[in-house]
Amino acid sequence: MRAALRRLPGLVAALGVGAAAVGLLWRPSGNSVSVVTPRGLPAQLAGDGLYRYDTVFTAWGNTAVDAVVLALGIPLMVTAWLKFRAGSPRGSLLLTGSLGYLLYVYATYALGVAYNPLYVAYLTLLAASLFGFIASLAAVDRAALAAVAADPDLPHRFLSWFLLTSAAVTALLWLQPLVTALLNGTAPALLDIYTTPVTSALDLAVITPAAALAGLLVRRRNPLGYLLAAPLLVTIVMLLPTIALSTALQAAAGISFTVPQFVGPIAGSAALGGVGAHLLVRLLRAVPASASPTGSDDRATRAHV
């Protein structure tokens, strides 16, 4: 597994930078195209740029994701990768977290973005981030995780409640439009030209149960819970810049938002992201600064990050 981690993060970094840069440089110009969806409803496609066959709403959302990946996601993963290669248990856990975030991003791109010239790159990024994530899970120092579980300074109960609350909020957020559409016999809101809401599928089938499981395991001080918490916390932290930027870009492109629709997601993601960032830092601080063959919780080996 460690052999795979000598190369896969580098591949993810190189391809991720390239794909995100193309998305940012080849942006929609504002010349949208009106179409009728297979369900007979009107929709606006971006019309040009890399995401020309996506709706205006989705195209500018993708542009925001590209910006966050390029500015934050890839640098975070590379930093963690270098620390991992230097033998840092903290770097190993953070590498798991950053690869988990990029796996989420490129699963969404490979499965949900309308076909464009970078489709093969999305597939490669999905494969590389998936197997890199699996390898990083296996490579995390189990003695370091045991030390985290025993750390009296880590707010274990608060972390558990935060993960469980995140699972509940995510479930409510995505189930509401799906249940409403089911009861009304209509398609979910914002489905537009797409055949299925991919983000809803990933959040409800993967993120929600993972957060709930991590919360329950942390409550029991099971080391596996802290391992699962890392990618979830990184993903939650990345929501703040992504949602804020995507909402601003969509509004500038002419998407109409009510005040609650504009302020609510940004305020919600700010609250979750702020708390998530605090907990991520506390989690990393609880990891021993260097690997210990005995797995002992030596407070002298810890350093603040």
Image (tube, rainbow, N blue to C red):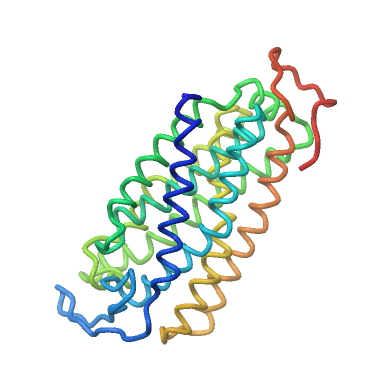
The residue under the point 59% across, 27% down is 222
Q: Is residue 151 or residue 300 the one in the foreground?
A: 300
User: Farthest residue in the right direction?
Assistant: 300
Measured from the top left, where is residue 154 in percent x and y?
Answer: 74, 37
Q: Is residue 232 or residue 176 the one in the foreground?
A: 232
172 vs 159: above or below = below
Q: Is residue 219 or residue 49 the one in the foreground?
A: 49
Place residue 96 in its image quadrant: top right
Number of marks present in the image shown: 0
217 vs 195, left or right, is: right
Measured from the top left, where is residue 237 in percent x and y?
Answer: 59, 55
The residue under the point 29% across, 71% down is 54
208 vs 198, left or right, is: right
The residue under the point 70% across, 45% down is 281
Q: Is residue 249 or residue 9 the one in the foreground?
A: 9
166 vs 286, left or right, is: left
Measured from the top left, where is residue 131 in percent x and y?
Answer: 40, 34
Measured from the top left, where is residue 170 in percent x and y?
Answer: 47, 56
The residue under the point 76% across, 43% down is 305
User: Farthest residue in the top direction?
Assistant: 294
Place residue 287 in its image quadrant: top right
